[in-house]
Image (cartoon, rainbow, N blue to C red):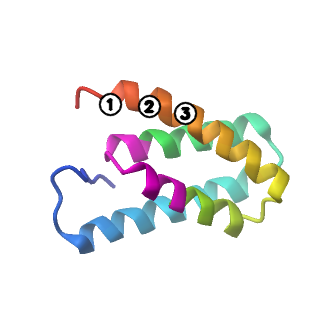
């Protein structure tokens, strides 16, 4: 699913994208739980999709916060997830700067 938050003004389409992205990352986190490398890959995919859509940082934080909690990660595990997402978002933003 694709959405560009710079140009999409339909709140329904924006919400649909955020719900889809949240559900995708929850499923990925659950299925890859315990596998560090696969989890990092899932988080990079999340960050790339979020940055490709030009999601604001606050929305990225909200989505990943809900996702890790619903996926059952402990507070310690969540801290590592947030660090990885921050790094991956920085990388993905550079890739999508010229979009």
Q: Residue furthest front?
A: 58
Check residue 88 in the rendering and tell me which mark sits there, or answer none.
Answer: 3
- Can residue 87 be seen by looking at this rendering? yes
Residue 14 x %, y %: 29, 65
Q: In 3D space, how far apart are the residues under numbered discs 3 and 1 (Cα atoms)?
A: 12 Å
Q: Secondary structure at mark 1?
A: helix
Q: Where the C terminus falls, by quadrant?
A: top left
**Residues tagged 1 and 2 counted as in contact (Cβ below 8 A):** yes
Labels 2 & 3 near each other (Cβ < 8 A)? yes
Q: Tell me, yes or no, whether the highlighted magenta stretch contains residue 92.
A: no
Magenta-drawn stretch, dominant element (helix, strand or loop): helix
The residue sitting at 68% across, 69% down in the picture is 70
Quick one: quadrant of the N terminus?
Answer: bottom left
- In the displayed structure, 1 sits above or below 11; it is above
Between the C-alphas of marks 1 and 2, the distance is: 6 Å
Image coordinates of residue 90 in percent, x first then y, are 48, 30
Q: In the image as oriented, which residue stretches furthest toward the bottom? A: 12
For the residue labelled by badge 3, is the local secondary structure a helix, a strand or a loop? helix
The CA span between labels 2 and 3 is: 6 Å
User: Against 85, is 1 above or below?
Assistant: below
Q: Give the magenta part as a residue range.
A: 49-62
Q: Between residues 75 and 43, which one lies in front from this camera angle?
A: 75
Q: Which residue corresponds to mark 2?
A: 92
Which disc number belongs to residue 58? none
Determine the residue positioned at 24% across, 50% down: 4
Task: Name the residue at 55% across, 33% down.
Answer: 88
The circle drawn on residue 96 is 1
Q: From where the camera sits, is residue 33 visible?
A: no
Could you say where residue 61 lies in the image, as x and y percent from the top left?
A: 53, 55
Residue 54 within the segment the image draws in magenta: yes
Residue sitting at 67 percent across and 39 percent down?
Answer: 83
Using the image as rendered, state which of residue 25 and residue 7 is in the foreground. Answer: 7
């Amino acid at each position: 699913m694709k959405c560009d938050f710079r140009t999409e003004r339909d709140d329904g389409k924006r919400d649909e994208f955020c719900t889809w992205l949240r559900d995708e990352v929850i499923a990925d986190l659950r299925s890859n739980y315990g596998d560090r490398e696969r989890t990092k890959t899932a988080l990079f995919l999340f960050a790339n999709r979020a940055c490709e859509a030009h999601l604001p940082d606050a929305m990225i934080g909200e989505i990943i916060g809900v996702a890790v909690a619903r996926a059952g990660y402990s507070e310690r595990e969540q801290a590592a997830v947030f660090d990885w997402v921050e790094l991956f978002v920085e990388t993905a933003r550079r890739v999508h700067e010229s979009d």
